[in-house]
Amino acid sequence: MTELKALCMKCRNAENKPTMQVMKNLKVEEKNGRFSAKGQCSVCGGNQFKFMSKVDAEKMK
C-alpha cells in the first residue's frame, strides 16, 4: 500500500491551521458510488477522513 496524507484537525501549526499528516490503519470504502479513506493520524492518533477518486481508491486496495 502507498502512503496517503490527509489533514489532521488536532495537529496544528503555529498559525493554528491543520497540517497534513500520514494516515495509518487505512481503510478504503465505497458508499453510494463515492470512495473514501478512513484512518488515524500517525502523529496524534486522531481520526482522519479523505474523499478520493475511483482510480486512487483501487490503487490503495
Image: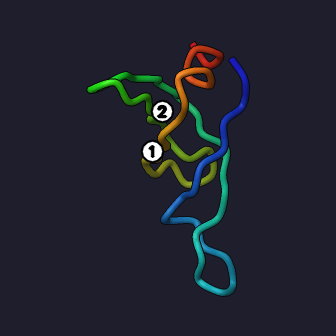
Give x and y (percent) for residue 39: 48, 36
Q: Nearer the viewer, residue 33 or 15?
A: 33
Left or right: 1 as drawn, with respect to 35? right
Q: Residue at x 53, y 22 (%)?
A: 54
Q: Residue at x 62, y 44 (%)?
A: 42
Q: Residue at x 54, y 30 (%)?
A: 53
Q: Is there CB contact under 8 Å for labels 1 and 2?
A: yes
Give x and y (percent) for residue 9: 49, 64
Give x and y (percent) for residue 19: 65, 64
Residue 36: image quadrant is top left
For disc 2, the marked residue is: 37
Residue 20: image quadrant is bottom right
Q: Nearer the viewer, residue 61 or 39?
A: 61
Q: Quadrant of the C terminus?
A: top right
**Measured along the vertical axis of the image, is residue 59 above or below residue 24?**
above
Element under disc 2: strand
Question: Given the image, on which type of amino acid does mark 2 rest?
Answer: Ala
Give x and y (percent) for residue 47: 43, 47
For disc 1, the marked residue is: 49
Question: Given the image, on which type of amino acid does mark 1 rest?
Answer: Phe
**Measured along the vertical axis of the image, is residue 19 above or below residue 55?**
below
